[in-house]
């Protein structure tokens, strides 16, 4: 941070730079519009000439119709000569077979050209061998409701050299400079306020309390950027501390649930190990891998918002109880979403019970629409549950891998299941018989099973329903009544 007393002028101020830039822009715009004004006048005159030729061809066709019908070539030649003198070009008259009846240039004779017009006149341009551009206006000769010939009026298109429109340039330049003057006055007052705000922000970021210097300083954008960087560092540090504290508190909640036998003991840590191995196999970025491992440790966080009797129930769950238990990832995701640093972790937890075939909860996502972290978490959590507390007797890791393979493509991502299978077979888990075991309700698995109605382990007595209840579960009106 640069103290106020040490900040000095760094070249022109923002107001001066803006004034010079806007003045240069005003001159450029005025010059551009001056040339464009001249070009516009030239284009207007060219369009007027083209419209005159088209109208002349149409009028000549109407007048030539009776003469062509009765073969009065003499009067037709006089009419064509008058039209030729008006445009200073060439006039062709064709009969109904497309044969040249009259050519004021006396070049084509009775050559057969063919009729090109339908029922309306049109224009076309072409280029001669000498490079001159010729505009040709064609009009049909109507007589008695049918087309009996065609009139063609040809004229050389003379390119017009656009002159500079001085009057238009002066008007535009004066208007632009007036706007620049107004902008310079407003910019001066704005920059003075920005400088005062900059000093206040820098003092606030540094934790100082004091007045704002009376004399304005230069380089206000530089000072404002320094102040914003200070504030950004402070905000990021604060958010990081809040995220770390919230994550630590969430881990303590999960640990409390495990101690109270409301969640499988050690399930989060073991799931984090399996998820970390799969994330390393996928070569995820360190930040993404850390999010996946933290989500694995908090895999049972949402159960803190589920009623204790549901978590302690030894028999099969009814429909409302199963829905309440399967809703626990949504609770975890919603409560982590309020902390910016943990939003990605919350998103992973929210979708951990999605199925690859789109029949999961809560949003019915399918295939690759499910977040990668959620797909990894589902496989790691399912494997640990199968090998510890999914059935009356926990499965071996080989049988658990077979269970995952049987559900690939329906519950789990088949590609991730193959990678996980290779990783586990490369380094199988050890100490399976020493793990703490408890029977969990069927709905806590990524897919339903019917062989989980066994009693909890007798290591600790079950808790009373009114004891250690973290938060009540959201229930429907039918259930509450």
Image (spheres, helix red, strand yellow):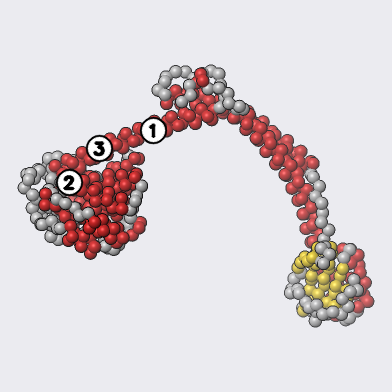
Q: Is residue 434 above or below residue 417?
A: above
Residue closer to the observer: 1 or 186: 1
What percent of the width, then of the height, locates residue 338? 32, 40
Can I make out residue 441 in this image? no
Residue appearing at x 28%, y 53% in the figure: 278
Residue appearing at x 13%, y 45% in the figure: 261
Using a 10 Å C-alpha cutoff, classify the residue at mark 2 as few (fewer than 14 neighbours), some (14 to 19) or many (20 or more).
some
Residue appearing at x 46%, y 25% in the figure: 1
- Real-space Cα separation, disc 3 to disc 2, in angstroms: 16 Å
Residue at which label 3 appears: 248
Sequence-wise, the earlier of marks 3 and 2 is 3
Residue closer to the observer: 431 or 401: 431
371 left or right of 266?
Answer: right
Residue at which label 2 appears: 266
Can I make out residue 229 in this image? yes
Using the rendered view, name the quadrant where residue 147 is placed.
Answer: bottom right
- Mark 3 or 2: in front is 2
Residue closer to the observer: 64 or 30: 30
Sequence-wise, the earlier of marks 1 and 2 is 1
Q: Secondary structure at mark 3?
A: helix
- Real-space Cα separation, disc 3 to disc 1, in angstroms: 20 Å
Using a 10 Å C-alpha cutoff, classify the residue at mark 3 as few (fewer than 14 neighbours), some (14 to 19) or many (20 or more).
few
Residue at which label 1 appears: 235
What percent of the width, then of the height, locates residue 420? 26, 57
Using a 10 Å C-alpha cutoff, classify the residue at mark 1 as few (fewer than 14 neighbours), some (14 to 19) or many (20 or more).
few
Q: Secondary structure at mark 2?
A: loop
343 left or right of 184?
Answer: left
């Amino acid at each position: 941070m640069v103290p106020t007393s040490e900040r000095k002028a760094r070249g022109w101020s923002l107001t001066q730079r803006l004034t010079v830039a806007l003045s240069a822009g005003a001159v450029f715009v005025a010059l551009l519009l001056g040339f464009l004004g001249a070009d516009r006048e030239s284009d207007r005159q060219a369009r007027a000439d083209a419209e005159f030729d088209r109208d002349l061809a149409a009028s000549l066709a109407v007048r030539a119709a009776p003469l062509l019908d009765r073969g009065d070539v003499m009067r037709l030649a006089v009419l064509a000569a008058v039209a030729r003198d008006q445009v200073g070009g060439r006039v062709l008259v064709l009969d109904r077979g497309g044969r040249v009846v009259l050519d004021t240039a006396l070049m084509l004779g009775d050559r057969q050209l063919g009729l090109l017009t339908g029922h309306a006149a049109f224009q076309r341009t072409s280029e001669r061998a000498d490079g001159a551009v010729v505009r040709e206006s064609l009009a049909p000769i109507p007589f008695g409701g049918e087309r009996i010939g065609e009139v063609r009026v040809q004229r050389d298109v003379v390119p017009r050299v656009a002159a500079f429109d001085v009057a238009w340039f002066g008007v535009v330049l004066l208007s632009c400079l007036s706007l620049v003057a107004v902008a310079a006055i407003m910019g001066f007052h704005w920059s003075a306020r920005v400088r005062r705000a900059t000093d206040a922000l820098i003092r606030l970021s540094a934790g100082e309390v004091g007045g704002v210097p009376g004399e304005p300083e230069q380089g206000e954008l530089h000072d404002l950027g320094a102040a914003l960087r200070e504030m950004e560092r402070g905000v990021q540090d604060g958010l990081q501390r809040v995220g770390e504290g919230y994550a630590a508190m969430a881990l303590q909640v999960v640990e409390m649930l495990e101690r109270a036998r409301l969640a499988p003991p050690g399930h989060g840590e073991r799931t984090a190990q399996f998820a970390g191995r799969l994330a390393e196999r996928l070569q995820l970025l360190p930040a993404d891998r850390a999010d996946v491992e933290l989500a694995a440790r908090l895999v049972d966080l949402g159960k803190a918002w589920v009623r204790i009797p549901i978590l302690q129930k030894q028999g099969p769950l009814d429909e409302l109880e199963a829905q309440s238990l399967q809703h626990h990832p949504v609770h975890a995701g919603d409560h982590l979403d309020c902390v910016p640093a943990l939003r990605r972790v919350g998103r992973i937890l929210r979708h951990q019970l999605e199925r690859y075939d789109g029949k999961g909860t809560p949003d019915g996502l399918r295939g690759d629409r499910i977040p990668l972290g959620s797909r990894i978490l589902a496989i790691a959590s399912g494997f640990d549950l199968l090998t510890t507390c999914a059935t009356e007797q926990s499965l071996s890791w080989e049988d658990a891998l077979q269970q995952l393979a049987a559900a690939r493509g329906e519950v789990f991502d088949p590609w991730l299941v193959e990678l996980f299978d290779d990783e586990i077979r490369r380094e199988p888990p050890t100490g399976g018989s020493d793990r703490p075991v408890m029977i969990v309700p069927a709905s806590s698995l990524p897919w339903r099973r019917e062989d989980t109605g066994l009693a909890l382990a007798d290591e600790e007595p079950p808790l009373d329903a009114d004891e250690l209840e973290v938060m009540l579960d959201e229930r429907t009106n039918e259930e509450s009544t």
